Amino acid sequence: MSEQAMIRIENLHKSFGALEVLKGVDLDVARGEVVVILGPSGSGKSTMLRCVNRLEEPTSGHIFIENDEVTDRKTDINKIRERVGMVFQSFNLFPHLTAKSNIMLALRKVKKMDKDEAEQKAVEGLARVGLADKADVYPIMLSGGQQQRVAIARALAMDPHVMLFDEVTSALDPELVREVLDVMKELAKGGMTMLVVTHEMGFARDVASRVVFMDEGVIQEQGTPQEVFDNPQNDRTKDFLGHIR
Amino acid sequence: MEAVIEYLESIKFIHLMMSPTIIWNALPLLFKGFLASLALLIGGYLLSLPTGLAAAFMKMAKNPIFRWPATFYVDFIRGTPLIVQILIIYFGVPLLVPGWREFQQSWFGQIKVFGVIDMNQYVRAILALVINSGAYLAEIFRAGIQSISKGQLEAARSLGMTTAQAMGYVIVPQTVRRILPTMMSEFILLFKDTALFFAVGIFELTLQARTIQARLFNMSPYIGAALFYLMLTIPLGRLVAWLEARLAVSETGREPENRQERKRRKAARAKEAAA
């Protein structure tokens, strides 16, 4: 395995009962790379992402993060998850905690930080996503875009080495999509390794270092945004891109 | 005052149903009964909380060795009348528990709980209540935990929390807030259910009232007992309603429609009055 490989996925299979969703996926993500995964719904892209931090248990195959095997049952998955931030389509903020406390919880309980240090980190994190004034507000009082930015800040506070984004703008009203994408762009500029499942073609074109097109449980095509968008080779890719234009 | 009471007693219906004199004179005994009912309620409820929680987690377990017994327990208890369960347990324990007779006659078995119920009666009664209420609470807990979206657990786990941490800091606090009104409703139901112990001869509130009623051929003691029940159930019922309203605010970020409406009307009336 190359020195820089952040994530390595080897021959990943995942079935739900009789339904085979992933039929052998291989993918390497280098440190600092922003890989955007495109594909029609049901193509297995979210499932693949969720296998990376083992929210889904792979049926077979191997996944490595910085030389630690995620799929090895002996690996302490919680230790790996500290290094792998994840942001969800439905935000999943903890509704009984304020924005600040949402960020502080894992810092205190997982990273065992003391209260002042965690609080300082939480406030800094909120400032980074432009929500310094919302520290003491409960999620219910925030817009979808704001909630999602808090969710990103919560994941970033753990100092992850890689971030997973699972259709994070799909549940947002159109006018709120931009503020979330802007935060993600900043993150990419700062050199964060990112694995992004999205339907935002503009984001893929502008920010991705590589675009991966998935369909029917396998990777059909991958390349730079220019290669995939302007000169797709695979018929399914052409078909998909044709539909969304 | 005396004239009023005299007048009331002269009306046959009032004298037979709610005689102030009889209720007044019955108060000391009714209060003793009230204490007994409270003792049953508190002991029964407190112990049914862990019982219900254990049964809830067993019922949600993947392993059928845990799931099946819990499912059978909950179905059996919820599907049969409490009075049948009380009769089985209350009279079954002395037959089935070795050494029960010795315990019953020992000084410990004769201790008066709250100064009113013999310990040996109390233990059997609590056992029946805990087994009954545990099953209902199990369903309340299970429904509450399962009503928290799966994403909450996933978010917690994705931050590196263990399952226990995710349960303790994320799932259970949300569950408790959500089911608190239902848990309190169960508390009120259980209080009223303690009346069934009159059938096995425990001198709780209802049996005290019945004893006086039988001596006087007058229904007023029952009304006296009813007042004691209401003293607890009405304030608690109001508290449940208030908690539910508050919960609605914290979950949706706005007050329930009927409250908003009431506030609007109040404001409109105030405006009218000012004009």
Image: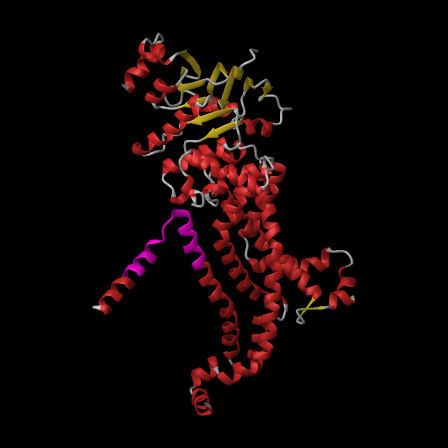
Q: Which residue is drawn at 73% across and 68% down?
A: B111
Tell me the quarter of the image containing the C terminus of chain A. top left
Image position, residue B257 (x, y; %): 32, 54
Camera sees residue B61: no
Magenta part of the chain: B241-265
Q: Which residue is drawn at 37% across and 37% down?
A: A144
Figure check: B47 above or below A129: below
Where residue A243 sits, quadrant-wise, is top left
Q: Which residue is drawn at 59% across and 62% down?
A: B41
Figure check: B17 above or below A30: below
Tell me the quarter of the image containing the N terminus of chain A. top right
Image position, residue B105 (x, y; %): 77, 66
Left or right relative to B124: residue A192: left
Residue A30 shown in magenta = no
Image position, residue B232 (x, y; %): 51, 67
Figure check: B1 above or below B34: below
Residue furthest bottom in the image: B3
Camera sees residue B12: yes
How many tags in the picture? 0
